[in-house]
Image (cartoon, rainbow, N blue to C red):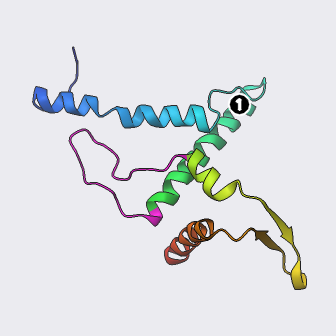
């Protein structure tokens, strides 16, 4: 039984209701990959700040992907997201958790990493999208 104030046929209302999976997966991703299921400190303010940082990192990940990619699908009755997002864990492993070190050649601080073409292309894709937006 579904109780709603949505003005639509029963079939469309059911499809709309069944489209909640995308929202539920966001909560699941926040808990598993942004440590939203963790209580960082004893104080309320500290935990609120910790939660805010987790949500901001999640939203930054999504915004980064939306700025650099075209939508993967159009609007559906289930209200599925237009983009098929890469999870924060995958992005973190692919681009961020890489061996590297800061060097200082000719007085310029430089991040030196191993020569990995896929990582280079991924980082350049994001940097170029931000340069175009600016």
On-image quarter of the N terminus: top left
In this image, 62 relative to 101: left or right? left
List x then y, in percent, for residue 71. Answer: 34, 59
Q: Is residue 105 above or below residue 125?
A: below
The quarter of the displayed image where residue 45 is located: top right
Q: Nearer the viewer, residue 120 or 77?
A: 120
Residue 9 point in image, percent of width and height? 9, 30
Name which quarter of the figure residue 20 lies in.
top left
Q: Residue 62: x, y in percent?
A: 50, 52
Query: Which residue shows up at 22% across the image and 23% down it?
Result: 4
- Pick whichever, 113 or 62, lies toward us: 113
SS for tag 1? helix
Any part of residue 97 in sight: yes
Badge 1: residue crowd in 10 Å (few <14, some 14–19, many ≥20): some
Residue 17, compared with residue 82, is above or below; it is above
Query: Does the magenta segment cover residue 6?
Result: no
Left or right: 25 with respect to 105? left
Residue bearing mark 1: 47
Which residue is at the far bottom? 106
Check the image and name the residue furthest to the left.
9
Residue 83 drawn in magenta: yes
Taking 12 as reference, is 101 left or right?
right
Q: Split into 4 quadrants, where in the image is the C terminus?
A: bottom right
Name the dominant secondary structure of the magenta segment: loop
Closer to the camera, 114 or 84?
114
Look at 71% across and 30% down and name the residue there.
Answer: 47
Q: Give, as a single range, the part of the protein colored magenta.
A: 67-87
Residue 7 appears in view:
no
Q: Quadrant of residue 79?
A: top left
Q: Which residue corresponds to the image point at 53% horizontal and 49% vertical from the top-left?
A: 59
């Amino acid at each position: 039984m579904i109780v709603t104030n949505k003005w639509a046929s029963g079939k469309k209302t059911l499809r709309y209701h069944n489209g909640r999976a995308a929202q539920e997966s966001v909560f699941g991703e926040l808990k598993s990959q942004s440590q939203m299921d963790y209580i960082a400190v004893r104080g309320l303010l500290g935990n609120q700040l910790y939660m805010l940082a987790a949500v901001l990192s999640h939203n930054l990940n999504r915004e980064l992907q939306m700025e650099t990619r075209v939508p993967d699908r159009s609007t559906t009755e289930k209200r599925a997201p237009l983009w098929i997002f890469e999870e924060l864990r995958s992005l973190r492993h692919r681009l961020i958790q890489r061996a590297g070190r800061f060097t200082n050649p000719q007085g310029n601080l430089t991040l030196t990493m191993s020569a990995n073409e896929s990582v280079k292309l991924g980082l350049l894709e994001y940097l170029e999208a931000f340069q175009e937006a600016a």
